[in-house]
């Protein structure tokens, strides 16, 4: 099994897409580091690092729950140290943690702008920076960043520029690492959904129950991650993948099982 004894660090893994990825890879026998802030459950969001870790172990993987705010470099370093002490190294980093605010310039509070920059860009960069010494020694090492293809259509810039530039920066990091780390045999790719995904952000911030019913489940992203991580790192790097395209490459074109409401109209996600 290609994931047995392979250690995968996932940021923002206490719920939603991050947790779905963790459980999917746990079923393949992976070691999962659940890296997130939540230690007390918020009823609006659900889940903590501990409940996610329990689900990972129930699915067949080994779990390490680590409370970390990726805005804090000391906490990142402590997380990496704990991961290495527990599992002996890190083979994969999945940059899932992200903040969102779909607001125009005048309605974007400075603290919200700073939050998105600190988590989406700086945090992503620092997580990879501190994991790199272990990725260099890892088994088929991959970095996957949950961010979109860079699409400079002005409609994406004009509607919510503060958020857009952070997500595009994440994708540029992914592409930059692909070039920088090619000689080390470390793959780096970005991944983004074709449709909206039923998460707490969709339900609480973006469109409520109505949008959730026009979305797919997080499991489509989890399956796409699985297929990317199965590929040889030296031969699969520098892509900004869309989930549907990854699955189509594996011969999977019937995606109905991922719809929250089978047969429903699906809402196209941002940037695609």
Image (spheres, rainbow, N blue to C red):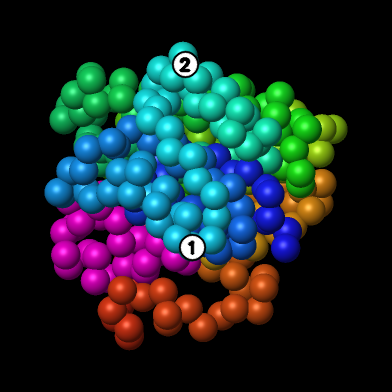
Give the image location of residue 49, x and y in percent: 36, 42
Say if mark 1 contacts mark 2, CB within 8 Å: no
Q: Residues within 10 Å of mark 1 (few under 14, many from 20)?
A: some
Q: Residue at 76%, 31% (x, y): give it.
A: 136
Q: Is the residue 22 above or below the residue 122 in the image?
A: below
Name the one closer to the observer, 171 or 96: 96
The single residue placed furthest to the right in the displayed view is 183
Q: Is residue 257 left or right of residue 62?
A: left
Sequence-first tag of 1 and 2: 1
Magenta residues, as a range?
194-221
Whether residue 187 can be seen here: yes
Q: Is the residue 101 above or below the residue 32 in the image?
A: above
Q: Is residue 269 left or right of residue 188?
A: left
Q: Is the residue 155 above or below the residue 28 in the image?
A: above
Q: Residue at 25%, 41% (x, y): give it.
A: 102
Q: Residue at 78%, 33% (x, y): give it.
A: 137
Q: Which residue is mark 2?
A: 73
Name the one closer to the observer, 225 or 239: 225
């Amino acid at each position: 099994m290609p994931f047995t004894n392979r250690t995968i660090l996932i940021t923002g893994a206490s719920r939603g897409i991050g947790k779905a990825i963790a459980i999917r890879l746990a079923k393949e026998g992976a070691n999962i580091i659940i890296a997130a802030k939540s230690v007390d459950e918020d009823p609006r969001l659900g889940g903590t690092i501990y409940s996610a870790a329990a689900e990972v172990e129930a699915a067949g993987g080994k779990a390490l729950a680590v409370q970390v705010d990726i805005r804090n470099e000391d906490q990142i370093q402590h997380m990496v140290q704990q991961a290495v002490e527990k599992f002996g190294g890190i083979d994969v980093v999945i940059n899932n943690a992200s903040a969102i605010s779909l607001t125009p310039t005048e309605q974007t509070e400075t603290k919200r702008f700073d939050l998105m920059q600190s988590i989406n860009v700086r945090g992503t960069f620092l997580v990879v920076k501190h994991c790199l010494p272990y990725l260099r020694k890892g088994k088929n090492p991959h970095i996957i960043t949950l961010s979109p293809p860079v699409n400079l259509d002005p409609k994406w810039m004009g509607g919510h520029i503060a958020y857009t530039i952070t997500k595009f920066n994440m994708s540029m990091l992914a592409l930059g690492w692909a070039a920088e780390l090619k000689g080390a045999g470390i793959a780096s790719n970005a991944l983004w959904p074709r449709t909206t995904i039923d998460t707490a952000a969709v339900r609480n911030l973006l469109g409520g129950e109505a949008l959730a019913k026009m979305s797919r489940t997080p499991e489509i992203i989890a399956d796409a991650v699985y297929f990317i991580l199965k590929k040889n790192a030296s031969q699969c790097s520098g892509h900004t993948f869309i989930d549907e395209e990854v699955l189509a490459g594996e011969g999977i074109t019937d995606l109905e099982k991922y719809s929250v409401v089978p047969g429903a109209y699906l809402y196209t996600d941002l940037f695609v």
